Amino acid sequence: MNKDNKKLLTYIIYAFIVVGISLFLFNLSKINFLQTFINTIEFSSFDLRQTIVSKYKTPNKDIVIVAVDDETYEYIMNNYGSWPITRKVWADMINYVELAKPKNIIFDLLFIKPNLNDIESDKALVEAVKNNDNVYLSMNLDNYPQEVRKPPVLDEKLKLNLKEGEFKDSNYITFANARVVMDELSAVTDNIGLINVEREADGVIRSMTPVFKYNGEYYPNLSFRVALDMLNLDEIKLVNNSILLDENHYIPLDETQRAVLNWYGGSHTYKHISMWRVIDALKNNNTEYLKDFENKTIYIGTTATSLSDVKSVPTEYRLAGVELHTTFLNNVMDNNFIKKVPTNINLLISILMSALVGYCVLRLTSVLKTIVFLIVTLVFYGVLSVVLMAQFNLWIGVVLPYISTITIFVLTYCEKYILKSKDYEQTYKLAVTDGLTQLYNHRYFQEQMINNVNAFKRYGTMFSLILIDIDFFKKFNDTYGHQSGDCVLKQVANILKKNSRTSDIVCRYGGEEMAIILTNTNKEEAVITANKVCLAVRNNKFVLANNEKVNVTISVGVATVGENGEKPQEIIEFSDKCLYVAKENGRNQVVSEVD
């Protein structure tokens, strides 16, 4: 296989690894505690992006909140003595504000039971609602058991006309019981919607349910009811998990079939008017004050901390519940809901990002450049996620792509440098190994001699050297040929390795000469090893290139550090003298001393 094909195969293998790891992490993320962990981080990243982009969004200036704030609560307690306030005040407020001809007056307050101690006030409120068809009232759903409250039958006129599609049952949509407005009010208006809100696991509200299911029928969220009337719609469609309203408005739903809100800011995003000021203006017949309500959509709700209608949202830790409903209406009218990218798209993004980073890790040679590239990629993706949310209302996942990308980076980086380390080891091995005998070469021999001499001088560590020469090797080559000579060299090398310890260093010194550096070995022990090697070669039958078997002998010279020299060259020279004496005295023997 040529180099280009190997490179292509490497990239294909890495591509499969990237996909495999991404799929593994994706399935791993479905484990409950990991899913909770990932969702928590993903939600936090969403909140951060919303906080950033909300600064550049303009809320609907025609939405006004009449707030039962802390000042109003104290005003009411001082002037009326209790909360809830008498319903005559609400009736008078409706009639007063209607003089300004507002678009809508929407109560984020529940009028559940008649006040038997103040029937006249109830009648006044009923009359005010009856005479003004732009007033909207609230109810909510729950799952109280029948023993606590018998589930009421809701009036047909409150139902939502779903022309196409069907919502799936879930804890966010389907409920078994209801708290409805008092019958006298329900009889005079069908402008009634639900104000249920649900927090995420971390206590933050990011989504709202547009449509609820009760007793097999569908009912709208309060602000959704208002929006349908403002758009002159009497039916909706559910197509591809989106609620279609008209050609310019639709509501994308997430996997829980809720709408993810797109925030315009934190507290007081919309104009707040303290309710006590409205009451005061009403008492004093101050019609100048009405200009704040001309052609406005007016929400009336509590913002006082003591009344406990405070929520946590992405852009604000403490936000009045009424502002959730104003934001929902604003999103509908602006066609401005967040579209959550499907999980499969996030998985694909994870694979592509991981593949890009993995490929660049393989290609880049500089460690610094590789790390900088990873950081730039992650930062760019983070900025891109903010831009997509700001410009296109898209919520792309951040956690899974980040985890996958960093995981691939670490694994690829490790694999790359493990391979590089192996390549280095292989290259080094080739550089210090004799190609024929697979023994260490002369260069490595010299390095180890220096290292062992230094160890002797510093720590007193003994070592010995034996030099080996194959007897009559030149004559052997002339007789049997160089191929047979090579066979003998390789077989002698194998005998030397088999008869040496793993700590000993067996080298090809040059030509037919070989050497063994015996670590932690004195002269006496070295001579024993030399004789063992000499005997093993003598008793071995060597197979030549033509399969002929012959006997071969060796001559051996022995030297020991300290005793025969303290420098590499001195030890080599002494060993070489011993080898010369062995040859002069008839070969096939070991010599360790010379005169």
Image (spheres, rainbow, N blue to C red):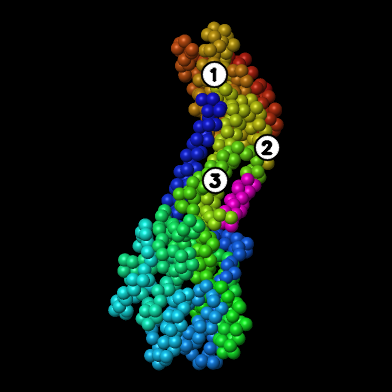
Q: Is residue 582 above or below residue 559?
A: above
Q: Is residue 44 visible?
A: no
Pointer 3 local density, CA inside 10 Å: few below 14, some 14–19, many at least 20: many
Q: Which residue is mark 2?
A: 454
Pointer 2 local density, CA inside 10 Å: few below 14, some 14–19, many at least 20: some
Q: Verify whether residue 374 appears in magenta.
A: yes
Assign a secondary structure to mark 3. Answer: helix
Q: Which residue is mark 1?
A: 489
| Nearest the eye: 151 or 397 | 151
Question: Label 2 is placed on what type of residue?
Answer: Asn
Q: Earlier in the sequence, mark 1 or mark 3?
A: 3
Residue bounds of the magenta highlight: 372-390
Q: Earlier in the sequence, mark 2 or mark 1?
A: 2
Nearer to us of marks 1 and 3 is 3
Q: Main secondary structure of the magenta part?
A: helix
Nearer to us of marks 2 and 1 is 1
> Which residue is at 56% across, 20% downward?
436
C-alpha gap between disc 2 and disc 1: 31 Å
Give residue 556's quadrant in the image: top right
Give residue 66's quadrant in the image: bottom right
Q: Is residue 186 above or below residue 58?
A: below
Nearer to us of marks 2 and 3 is 3
**Whole-percent x and y of residue 171?**
38, 66
Image quadrant occupied by the C terminus: top right
What's the mark number on residue 353? 3
> Which residue is at 64% across, 18% downward?
580
Q: Verify whether residue 55 appears in magenta.
A: no
**Whole-percent x and y of residue 363?**
60, 37
